[in-house]
Image (spheres, rainbow, N blue to C red):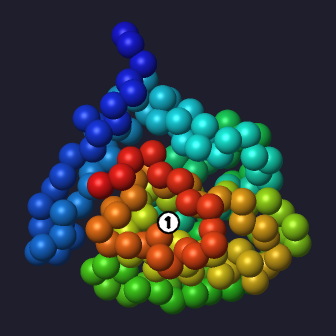
Amino acid sequence: MPIPTDFNAYIKDVANFPKPGVVFKDISPLLQDGPALRAAILALKDLVNGAQIDKVVGMESRGFILGPALALELRAGFVPVRKAGKLPRKTIRRSFALEYGEDVLELHQDAIQEGDRILIHDDVLATGGTARAVQQMVQELGGKIVQFNFLIELQFLKGIEQLPQQQVAALLKY
């Protein structure tokens, strides 16, 4: 079987989810196809361009899917960012706006050390609120953000504007 290179074929639009007017980009077909999933992880790794990464920081929940696999490929650790109340030790937290609501994220205070080289990964860059909140927490803990890495960027929502002066890469852009 040939290695997939057109990842667009594995992304399905779901209209009016999670609320009317939103077109959800469903990555489930990509996740369900082993060769496509492997190719996507390697392509995400290639977006880093050989930069040294100490830890991949992934956001709940879909950042947990590809983030750990990406960390393994980069020989880095993985740090989960979770919704409020889900982490057992001392945390820092940030609230942020979504394109369809508001939420709070937390990160263990000891998850990132001063000078750690960080790749922040999530499945989708939409309005940029989630990524900006995570950026603030990582920087508060002394992490050096090397890059933001996304499977999908929804360019029409201009989330990249929330990440000025940051290196941002996405495998797919809509």
Judge from the rendering whether residue 100 lies leftward or rightward of residue 96; answer left or right: left
Residue appearing at x 63%, y 68% in the figure = 166
Q: Nearer the viewer, residue 2 or 103?
A: 2
Q: Quadrant of residue 126?
A: bottom left
Residue appearing at x 79%, y 70% in the figure = 143
Residue furthest front as drawn: 165
Q: Quadrant of the N terminus?
A: top left
Give the x, y percent position of residue 8.
29, 39
Q: Quadrant of residue 79?
A: bottom right
Residue furthest top as drawn: 1
Judge from the rendering whether residue 7 lies leftward or rightward of residue 93; answer left or right: left
Residue kind at label 1, given as amino acid type: Glu
* Res. 72 in view: no
Give the x, y percent position of residue 5.
39, 27
Residue appearing at x 56%, y 33% in the figure = 42
Judge from the rendering whether residue 19 lies leftward or rightward of residue 121; answer left or right: left
From the viewer's perspective, is residue 172 above or below residue 117?
Answer: above
- Tell me the element at label 1: loop
Q: Nearer the viewer, residue 26 or 139?
A: 139
Give the x, y percent position of residue 125.
43, 64
Give the x, y percent position of residue 39.
48, 29
Q: Quadrant of the C terminus?
A: bottom left
* Res. 23 in view: yes
Residue under circle 1? 60
Q: Quadrant of residue 44?
A: top right
Residue appearing at x 57%, y 87% in the figure = 94
